[in-house]
Image (tube, grey):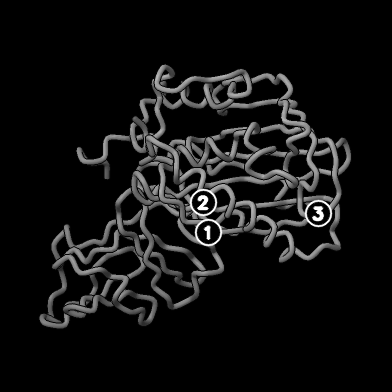
């Protein structure tokens, strides 16, 4: 339900990751936050449900309640809500057979994809972005995160798709000060999002396996807060998607999905530790940026040719009319 206090229908109607699927157990109520809203997640017969975390009777968080017989019980007055959100029992008036129409808990659209739980607060206008490598038999896939970042979610996406910082912020790993130049690359914008093609650079230790190589990136921004890249040398392929939860305008949670078709003997935990290290280098940079909100006025900051993807992203966000996390 879009309100005057939240004027961005693009984000309101988009799919957002809010939790790792493995973290939501049967008979558990899990509280999450999205776009300033409190949401309670729970499973019923393996189905994931997402509700506004507010009892419609007196506004107590339902996440503080419990699950009994496939229903949620409010901790305040014991009202019982079935999986559709309907109030089916009022302990103080057990003979009551008809409850007011506004007694139903507000439900959100929810999907479980790529090891994560995605929800939309409004009416989804697009599908959850496709990460085709995730289910390919010759790829190994795993998740990383969550990473809490005290900055605009737009800043987080822009950092993920910024190639020029790799030789400096991630020197010796994803880039080298001896090879800082970013080759010219093409950027296209269409109804599927933004694509940067054939971004070439040398990486000393690109995946934490200790093997240096020259790589070519294909990077896509598929929704305002979902980005993807794949890189390789023609045979070996390493792919990653980023989904950013916009908790509040200046508080974000980053989640990663990673897939590769080589070095399959390497333990995923080792690669996850490497990714955690990379994020520990990125997060202080992003949190230190000022302004914290992403400027969509291209005159607010200056740009160089290596920023072509960032410029396209800012233009695209402005065309969409997005305001949350922007200035």
Q: Residue at x 54, y 64 (%)?
A: 21
Q: Residues within 10 Å of mark 2 (few under 14, many from 20)?
A: many
Nearer the camera: disc 3 or disc 1: 1
Furthest-right residue in view?
235
Tell me which label, 2 or 1, sits earlier in the chain.
1
Answer above or below: position of 91 versus 254. below
Tell me which label, 3 or 1, sits earlier in the chain.
3
Judge left or right: residue 283 versus residue 93. Answer: right
Image disc number at residue 137 = 3
Judge left or right: residue 306 versus residue 173. Answer: left
Q: Which residue is mark 1?
A: 146
Q: Residues within 10 Å of mark 1 (few under 14, many from 20)?
A: some
Residue 152 x/y as whole percent = 41, 42
Residue 304 x/y as whole percent = 58, 19
Furthest-left residue in view?
93
Closer to the camera, 209 or 34? Answer: 209
> Residues under labels 3 and 1: Cα distance?
26 Å
Nearer the camera: disc 2 or disc 3: 2
Q: Residues within 10 Å of mark 3 (few under 14, many from 20)?
A: few
> Residues under labels 2 and 1: Cα distance?
6 Å
Residue 7 x/y as whole percent = 27, 35
* Secondary element at tag 3: loop
Closer to the camera, 125 or 8? Answer: 8
**Decide: marks 2, 1 in contact (CB < 8 A)?**
yes
Answer above or below: position of 222 versus 312. below
Closer to the camera, 211 or 119? Answer: 211
* Secondary element at tag 1: strand
Q: Which residue is mark 2?
A: 254
**In the rendered image, which quarter contains the N terminus?**
top left
């Amino acid at each position: 339900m879009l309100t005057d206090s939240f004027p961005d229908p693009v984000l309101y109607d988009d799919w957002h990751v809010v939790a790792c699927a493995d973290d939501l157990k049967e008979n558990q109520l899990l509280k999450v936050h999205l776009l300033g809203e409190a949401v309670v997640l729970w499973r019923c017969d393996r189905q994931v449900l997402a509700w506004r975390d507010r009892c419609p009777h007196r506004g107590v968080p339902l996440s503080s309640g419990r699950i009994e017989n496939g229903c949620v019980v409010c901790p305040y007055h014991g009202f019982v809500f079935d999986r559709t959100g309907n109030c089916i029992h009022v302990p103080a008036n057990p003979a009551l057979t008809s409850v007011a129409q506004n007694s139903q808990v507000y439900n959100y659209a929810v999907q479980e994809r790529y090891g994560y739980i995605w929800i939309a607060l409004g009416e989804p206008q697009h599908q959850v972005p496709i990460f085709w490598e995730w289910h390919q038999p010759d790829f190994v896939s795993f998740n990383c995160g969550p990473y809490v970042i005290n900055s605009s979610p737009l800043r987080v996406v822009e950092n993920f798709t910024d190639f020029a910082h790799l030789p400096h912020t991630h020197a010796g790993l994803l880039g080298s000060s001896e090879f800082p130049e970013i080759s010219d690359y093409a950027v296209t914008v269409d109804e599927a999002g933004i694509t940067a093609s054939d971004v070439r650079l040398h990486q000393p230790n690109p995946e934490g396996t200790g093997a240096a190589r020259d790589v070519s990136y294909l990077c896509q921004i598929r929704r305002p807060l979902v980005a993807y890249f794949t890189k390789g040398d023609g045979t070996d392929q390493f792919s990653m998607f980023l989904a950013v939860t916009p908790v509040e305008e200046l508080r974000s949670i980053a989640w990663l999905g990673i897939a590769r078709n080589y070095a399959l003997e390497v333990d995923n935990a080792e690669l996850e530790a490497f990714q955690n290290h990379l994020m520990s280098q990125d997060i202080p940079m992003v949190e230190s940026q000022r302004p914290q909100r992403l400027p969509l006025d291209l005159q607010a900051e200056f740009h160089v040719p290596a920023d072509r993807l960032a410029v396209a992203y800012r233009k695209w966000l402005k065309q969409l009319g997005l305001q949350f996390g922007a200035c």
